[in-house]
Image: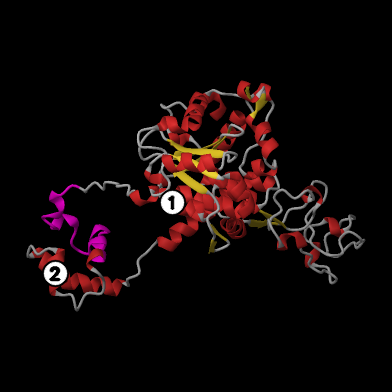
Amino acid sequence: MRYNHLTLEERIQLQHCLEQKLSFRASGLLLGRDPTTLSREVKRYSVRKRIGSWNASFNNCSFHRDCDRKHLCDFPCSKRCKNCEQCYLHCPDYVKKECARLLKPPYVCTGCPQRTRCTLEKVLYEAKNAQRLYETILSESRSGTSFAAEEIEQMDALLAPGIKQGHSPYLLYTNHKEEMLFSERTLYRLIDQNRFSFRNLDLPAKVRYRPRKKTVSHKVDRGCRKGRTYKDYLAYCAENPDVSVVEMDTVLNRPGEPVLLSLWFSESCLHVYHLRERNDAKSVTDFFVTLANQIGKERYKALFPVLLTDNGSEFSNPEAIECPVIDGVKSEPLIRVFYCDPGMPSQKAGVEGNHALLRRIVPKRLSMRSLTVSKVVKINAHLNSLLRKKLKDRSAYESFSFFHDESLLQLLGISKIPASEVILTPELLK
């Protein structure tokens, strides 16, 4: 689950989900977003339009269906007034009618089957319009400064003489700390914004230094492997021979780009890919916590009884996966997470081997930035609709449906397509 702002691509996908009559819960799973985030998005950026239906003009009067009134205004016409968009301005019996469906999810007319016959005011969610409103609000909320012009002038009069004498902002801040209206860091930021009469060029040390590059370090909790080694995994499987295993990995092309979380279900050969903006532990745990809240404890336990993964830093928080927070409460251990030995990807050969199919569609030369949620949904559908010899000429979709409720596939965002229409080339992404 991501906590950054929705993108235009995600808003387009949300509009598509509304048109397909998907719930906020199902849409949230597809987009990797909390359902509440999507409902707030729809409420905040929907627009009201006074438009009618295909064969009738706008009219939101409670009596318009049975109304036969004519000549309410001075305009000479012979048609019934209910067919005029302005009739409510002149009618003494006008009573406004609002659709009761707008009081409950999805709060909009998008996807409503009655939309083409309804003459009431429409509430519509349009992705591009929502993006424009979002950008406007974002810009307005961050424009300007929290300091009055008089305060800036006061600080300029205090600092400018010292700058002309060659003093650094740090020295001036230290000498006048009791008189300063802001922090040292804010002082440097205001200088960068050219809010004072002096500039960065007036600071001798500032112009000598290049901007420092920040190095990203991935912290791995080595203690997370305690009791979860591959040896522990073999012992657990020996005690529970009927347990089904889900192998987990990360697919990445270039450092710093989005990555794919890869899940391979050994009993059915189902392969699920989930797009993550960055390769960190939080994006992995957010996916599992969101899914656990969507499907509940029992189905979560049945879906992932055992997870086997490698020692990547993104998998260094197994407790959050084993004991997900559901409805705001941390649950008891529901599943088990184990790790392969370092440098032994062959110990999870299933997920590694199936990446060969993915690479037919997403070659290593392709930038992961070109992938979107909708494209990953298509990849999942085509890969899992492929007929497999090892499954006796059945698809992974059909095999998974034999072991689990088919509704789980819908929650995972996987649909079935005819085997003859399966595409395993980069053409699928166009």
Tell me what residue is drawn at x 77 percent, y 62 percent. Answer: 100
Q: Residue at x 30, y 46 (%)?
A: 216
Which residue position is annotated with label 2?
172
Residue 207 located left or right of residue 373: left
**Image point 18% across, 56% down: which residue?**
200
Q: Position of residue 177 (x, y in %)?
A: 18, 75
Residue 66 quadrant: bottom right
Which residue is more in the foreground, 235 or 20?
Answer: 235
Which element is circle 1 on?
helix
Q: Residues within 10 Å of mark 1 (few under 14, many from 20)?
A: some
Q: Between disc 2 and disc 1, whose residue precedes?
A: 2
Q: Which residue is mark 1?
A: 282
Numbered disc 2: secondary structure: helix
Q: Quadrant of the C terminus?
A: top right
Q: What kind of residue is marked 1?
A: Lys
**Residue 47 drawn in magenta:** no
Can residue 390 be seen at all in this image of the molecule?
A: yes
Question: Is residue 99 visible to the viewer in this orientation of the structure?
Answer: no
Front residue of 388 and 75: 388
In this view, 407 is above or below 50? above
Tell me: residue 37, above or below residue 364: below
Where does residue 383 sit, x and y in percent of width and height? Answer: 59, 29
> What range of the chain is rendered magenta?
186-210
Label 2 vs label 1, nearer the camera? 1
